[in-house]
Structure formats: C-alpha cells, structure tokens
Image (cartoon, rainbow, N blue to C red):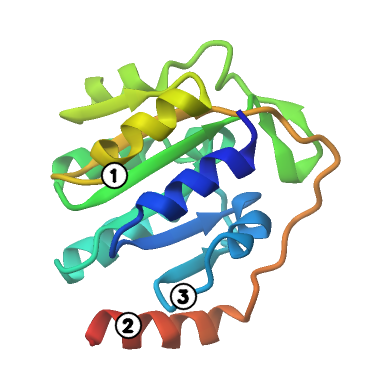
Amino acid sequence: MQLDDVLEVVAAHRGNHVVMATMSAIGAWPRFSDTPLDFCYLPSSMGLGPSLALGMALAQDRHGVIVLAGDGSTLMHLGALATLAAYPAAVYLVVLNNGIYEVTGGQRTVGSMAVNFVQAAQAMGFRRTCRFADKAAWQSGAAAALSGPGPVLIELPIEPRFGQKMPRPPRPMAEQLVRLRAALAS
C-alpha cells in the first residue's frame, strides 16, 4: 500500500474524529483534508502523538482522535500502548509500517522485521486491534476499525519512501491549536 492509499481511506471514514498526522504523514494529509479537526503534530520527540491524542480524547467525548503514526514513532514510545489500554478512550492509532525511519534518512526499523504491533497492543491490554494487508482490505474494514470503543490499534504495511525530508505543517502549531480548540468547543 502507498501512504496516499491509506490517507484516502482515512479521509473517507474519519467521521467527526480529530485526525492527528505525525511525522511523514504531515506532508501528505493536507492533500486529503484541511478542516479545524485536523492537527499536524510535529513534536520535538518522536512517538508522543498517541499520548497527546489520549489527553484530547479524555478531555472531551464528542470527537475521537485518529493518530497517523509511523512504526518508528510507535517504537520510540512503545509505552504509550500500555497507557492507552489503561485509560480507554476513543483513540484510533493507525501505525503506518514502512519499516524505516522515513524523515531521518531511511534507516531500517525493527518494525517490519521483529515487532508485531497488533500482538504488542493486545499484550498491553488493547481489546481491539487489526491489521490490513492491502488497500482492498483496508477499504472494506476501515469504517468498523475507525468507529466504536477505543483504543484501537490498526497496523497498515505501506511502501517506504526514501529521501523524504521533515515535512512542514500546513500552518503554525499555535494556529492549528486555536482552530482545533474552537472546533472541539463548538
């Protein structure tokens, strides 16, 4: 699967969820959506998106949060899976598994070789997990995976894109937060 294949399906099935794009997904997500419920989160530390999403989901219950995170980011803060499981909320963690640290130079991760993210999430207490091997399966299963109680871990294998540079969010983080806060309050 290509990253754009995944994002196209997320955009079609997001409903009223916040979509938090992290790392390499930041550069692609604005081609599919630009609403106040979109948040392109570029942290100074990889892997913090799921924790921020949990805080958002617990602070309000009208909008779930879909996190688009790479396998490298998920590995950087694997403990977030245990925290998500311990504090159930409408968080849908989409692990984009391309087997590389895409925005830091394409170094291999152990994400596609040695780590089964679905089993790891289950071992940490997730009741809902799934892995879709191709675009057709993702298209047919996305609506169910991105709805219902959370947390949910969704692992999607995607083709690596070598030579990517650190993406820039479509607007400054402070502006995004103002838009998001207003959307969550309305």
Residues under numbered marks 3 and 2 in contact, where contact means CB atoms less than 8 Å apart: yes
Snapshot quadrant of residue 141 = top left
In terms of secondary structure, where does tag 1 sit? loop
Q: Residue at x 60, y 28 (%)?
A: 1
In terms of secondary structure, where does tag 2 sit? helix
Mark 1 vs mark 2, CA separation in Å = 20 Å
Q: Residue at x 16, y 69 (%)?
A: 62
For the residue pair 119 and 26, the one nearer the viewer reads as 26
Which mark is on residue 183? 2
For badge 1, the amino acid type reads Leu
For the residue pair 81 and 94, the one nearer the viewer reads as 94
For badge 3, the amino acid type reads Thr
Q: Horizontally, is 86 left or right of 23 in the view?
A: left
Q: Quadrant of the C terminus?
A: bottom left
Mark 1 vs mark 3, CA separation in Å = 18 Å
Snapshot quadrant of residue 53 = bottom left
> In the rendered image, which residue does mark 3 sit on?
35
> In the rendered image, which residue does mark 1 sit on?
146
Upstream in the sequence, badge 3 or badge 2? 3
